[in-house]
Amino acid sequence: MASVSRLSRRIPTRHSPDPARVHDYVLGGCHQPASACQVHHLRHKGHGGVTSLDNCLLLCWYQHNVVIHRMGWTLVRHPDGTTMAWNRDQSKVLRSHSPPARAGLPPGAA
């Protein structure tokens, strides 16, 4: 797990997320490049979360500040890399794409 000190808010470049796996699949509808995104901690630093690839996702300013922090949506990443988000009263749930297919298997086969 790559992590950085509490004094730094940047993940080292060699550990940066693949631009092809940017935030678009998390909440959808946004096509900002990774360079225009903000890092969101899945487990808040105030609750023991660390700045690491396992605990961070890239979100555009709107999704990060408005949807997550102001509107109170919850965002989680599952062990298979998929994400799920829901609003405060859980009346709306968004799911990311399916996990990537394993090499050599036809789509839908597990």
Image: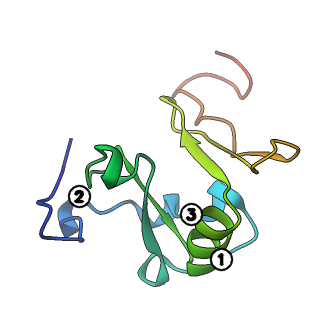
Location of residue 78 with respect to 70 vertically, above or below? above
Q: Earlier in the sequence, mark 2 or mark 3?
A: 2
Q: Residues within 10 Å of mark 1 (few under 14, many from 20)?
A: few
Residue that appears at 26% across and 55% down:
51
Q: Nearer the viewer, residue 84 or 65?
A: 65
**Left or right: where 96 falls relative to 90:** left
* SS at mark 2 in the image: helix
Tell me the kind of residue under disc 2: His
The CA span between labels 3 and 1 is: 8 Å
Tell me the kind of residue under disc 3: His
Q: Earlier in the sequence, mark 3 or mark 1?
A: 3
Q: Read off the residue under disc 1.
A: 31
* SS at mark 3 in the image: loop
Residue that appears at 60% across and 34% down:
99
Q: Are marks 2 and 3 in contact (CB under 8 Å)?
A: no
Residue that appears at 40% across and 60% down:
18
Q: Residues within 10 Å of mark 3 (few under 14, many from 20)?
A: many
* SS at mark 1 in the image: loop
Pinpoint residue 65: horizontal percent, then vertical percent. 57, 74
Location of residue 30 with respect to 90 vertically, above or below? below
Tag of residue 15: 2
Q: Read off the residue under disc 3.
A: 23
The CA span between labels 2 and 3 is: 16 Å
Pinpoint residue 26: horizontal percent, then vertical percent. 63, 55
Residue 41 occupies which quadrant of the picture?
A: bottom left
Pinpoint residue 1: horizontal percent, then vertical percent. 21, 41
Pinpoint residue 14: horizontal percent, then vertical percent. 19, 63
Tell me the kind of residue under disc 1: His
